[in-house]
Image (spheres, rainbow, N blue to C red):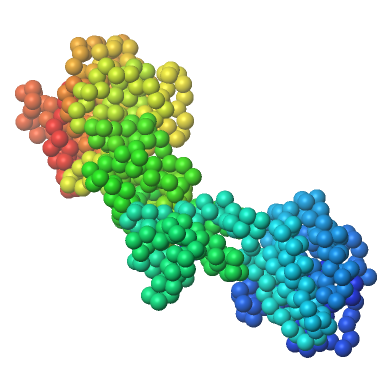
Amino acid sequence: MGQYTASQRKNVRILLVGDAGVGKTSLILSLVSEEYPEEVPPRAEEITIPANVTPEQVPTNIVDFSSVEQSDEALAAEINKAHVVCIVYAVDDDDSLDRITSHWLPLVRSTCSSSSSTNTDGEPDVARKPIVLVGNKIDLIEYSTIDSVLAIMEDYPEIESCVECSAKTLHNISEMFYYAQKAVLHPTSPLYIMEEQNLTPACKKSLVRIFKICDIDSDNLLNDYELNLFQRRCFNTPLQPQILDEVKSVIQKNVPDGIYNDAVTLQGFLFLHCLFIQRGRNETTWAVLRRFGYNDQLEMCKEYLRPALKIPPGSSTELSHRGQQFLIALFERYDRDGDGALSPEEHKMLFSTCPSPPWSYSTDIRKSCPTNDCGWVTLHGWLCRWTLMTLIDVVKTMEYLAYLGFNVHENDSQLVAIHVTRERRIDLAKRQSSRSVYKCHVIGPKGSGKTGLCRGFLIDDMSKLLGKEFKTNVVHCINSVQVYGQEKHLILRDIDVRHALDPLQPQEVNCDVACLVYDSSNPRSFEYVARIYIKYFAESKIPVMIVGTKCDLEERRQDYLMQPAEFCDKYKLLPPHLFSLKTNKKELYTKLATMAAFPRFQAAWILFYKHRYLRQFGLMTEDPKVWLKAGLGVAAATVLGFIVLKAISATGTHSR
């Protein structure tokens, strides 16, 4: 569900401290036996209350302290281990009340501040440990000490609550331990500033994010439908119309701009939570915060942002149908003008529920995915950019889906938004890939035109890129292509290697298809490509295509022991594909995607193109003996292989 509640805490440890004779031990024994003990030992043994008998369904350990039996060192250790400290005083003893501020509160503060230990959950202790003030022996007086205690609470924000009780009459005994539990599970200090009578900045920031996520139509209001969805998501129950009207009435009376057009504004939403806390209903606000992924420090839980995802070696990650549908709905929700693209302002508003956008709109978007003429990301480009991030950094995708409210809107964790593909070795064995996203590494010497080749993938008129200098840190480009009637996404990664002798890292070699680029007008360009192929790809199973760029210029003979066509023939590669931004033809990208989708049919492709080459120049022979060996090669391919060949040939060819 992606929902985080108090019940996920392993236990609550409550420590009772106070002066001798105030009744600490009696309180514990009265709670356990439900009757006042006639004989009280110096100290009660530690007791554990099972989860099923506590209001919050959390196991609770209650620890007593006795200065007669224990040392100051033992007291410090117990304070550090405790989740909450109950300071007990006798309501009929002014000295014990004064000792709260003169001794006990400073002692707890200094002990926690000087300690670097961790509590029983393995979490670091904070300096301000929750405290509950407990006035015992209320049966002995006819007045209350609460007013005096409230004055103390103003000076010590760590005091969560105060309660008067009686161990003898059992008055408020169970309530006292409930308040202690509540101080741990639903603490006030992260939410509310007593002195200012207002929400803390962190709480306000969290609630603003929640409001935006629940504002489905993005009109800065929560209407009845949105409020009911919010209620169901957080509390699994609908909001009755009468209750809803009463809530609106309370907001209207206290916050003039809290209601607009019979809907709740952000100010009204914040006031409502402020009111819950002021009335001691912290658990309501905490239930909301935890449903939206926040922990006790009002930070989003790591488990909520990054649920464990198992990815076998050789598998990759793609967006599932549910992930795509969520992102489409999100795009359409923030495309206010309905022009099919996100303007910079719309893009900024969409990611306002996140710490920061996952990418730079001004540089990354324009240079990594399709945009409109203004450079604004289209719906197609939007899905492409998420597809890219999901393949290369799936953890980041899951984080941002959580920030954007996927867990709440889809009522499930982000794992259902991710599809883990089968292992690549299985694809190779079956001679067909089940994936829809492929990674192509574009490698070539500096100045070979590989960056232009990558950018040309993103725009309809590639000639607009002529003469441009590409200076950027953006190395990935993504777009979709049709491979035999199916939409596939191809990611081009521009591998920047300055010198031929510079080694490629494993992550720069491993890909679904490699595109080795040389400048056909530069006689010294091909040698780099040849060396890279021999060193890294000759013995691998990665399909490779060699591409000669700038074919609109005069083709130069290469200063290498073999010319590109001879090299490809020797190593059983497809003939070099000649490419130019001027020609504005994009069949290269379809060929690359097809090679990635059908990685085991490279031999059949070569035979197919050789056959076309010979026929084109009238060199085709009818001697059956000459074609016997070729026929054996074709027979090794399945019928699917020939379908692939048809898909490639349908795009045309510029091979020599």
* Total numbered circles: 0
125 over 288 or under it: above or below: above
Lateral position of residue 399 relative to residue 138, left or right? left
Q: Is residue 405 visible?
A: no
Towards the viewer: 440 or 173: 173
Q: Residue at (59%, 53%) from the top-left corner?
A: 200
Give the quadrant of the C terminus: top left
Q: Residue at (73%, 83%) from the top-left corner?
A: 171
Instruction: Please tell me in which quadrant of the rendered image residue 501 appears.
Output: top left
Q: Is residue 169 visible?
A: yes
Q: Give the percent coordinates (x, y) of residue 407.
A: 43, 59
Lateral position of residue 522 relative to residue 278, left or right? left
Q: Give the percent coordinates (x, y) of residue 570.
A: 27, 25
Instruction: Please tell me in which quadrant of the rendered image residue 258 appears.
Output: bottom left
Q: Residue at (61%, 75%) from the top-left corner?
A: 57
Q: Residue at (29%, 33%) from the top-left corner?
A: 375
Q: Give the percent coordinates (x, y) of residue 595.
A: 26, 38
Lateral position of residue 552 relative to residue 157, left or right? left
Q: Give the percent coordinates (x, y) of residue 466.
A: 24, 19
Towards the viewer: 251 or 291: 251
552 over 303 or under it: above or below: above
